[in-house]
Amino acid sequence: MARVVVLRLGHRRERDKRITTHCGLVARAFGASEIILSGEEDNAVMEKLKDVVERWGGPFEISYVKNWKDFIKEWKERRGIVVHLTMYGIPIQKAINEIKEKFKDSDLLVIIGAEKVPKEAYFLADFNVSITNQPHSEVAALAIFLDRLFQGKELEREFENWKVKIIPQKRGKALVKRDS
């Protein structure tokens, strides 16, 4: 199966650390293979996400790229298609079938912004997709996009090499912990 990689564009260390962490958590939990940060390099956020993978399982990669434009251009040349999640794009319900069709044969890069996204990103993307044309969170947009892309199958995913795992139950909290 093709890979989904999330590019967090324009990360700012102080302002975005919590939301970027949440983007990484959603990317992992909802089926992406990797999140790549761009903007200010932030080892603290990257280490928090690596710690989640260490405890809750993977595989999931976290990395940083300085030049996002070159990265996107290389992605398109070598790996696959680019979807930019923006409230200015084509509604997901109109774009998702075509994206899924192309995703069968290509890896998929999903761009989500932190600061104002430069216009070059709109032109580099193969698809500019909106979850809604109203102001909203990139965390919510990413979750909805991945859920539509994977048709809910990502919710049944089992993570490898976990040390902590939740046991679903009607009431209360139950965890299983193992050393490995």
Image (spheres, rainbow, N blue to C red):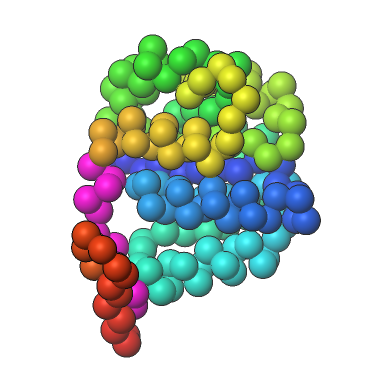
Q: Is residue 80 left or right of residue 153?
A: right
Q: Please provide the residue range marked out in magenta.
A: 153-166
Q: In percent of the image, x 38 and y 12: which residue is there?
A: 94
Nearest to the observer: residue 140 or residue 94: 140
Q: In percent of the image, x 60 and y 43: which residue is there?
A: 8
Q: Is residue 124 left or right of residue 165?
A: right
**Could you tell me how many numbered marks the image carries?**
0
Does the magenta run of residues contain 165? yes
Q: Position of residue 127 (x, y in %)?
A: 49, 20
Q: Position of residue 35 (x, y in %)?
A: 52, 50
Q: Position of residue 167 (x, y in %)?
A: 24, 67
Q: Is residue 140 left or right of residue 164?
A: right
Q: Quadrant of residue 143?
A: top left
Which quadrant is the N terminus positioned in?
top left
Q: In percent of the image, x 29 and y 84: which residue is there?
A: 178
Q: Is residue 8 visible?
A: yes
Q: Quadrant of residue 54?
A: bottom left
As drawn, 125 above or below 153: above
Which quadrant is the C terminus positioned in?
bottom left
As drawn, 163 above or below 93: below
Q: In percent of the image, x 37 and y 16: which residue is there?
A: 93
Q: Position of residue 159 (x, y in %)?
A: 29, 62
As drawn, 150 above or below 59: above
Nearest to the observer: residue 166 or residue 157: 166
Q: Is residue 66 visible?
A: no
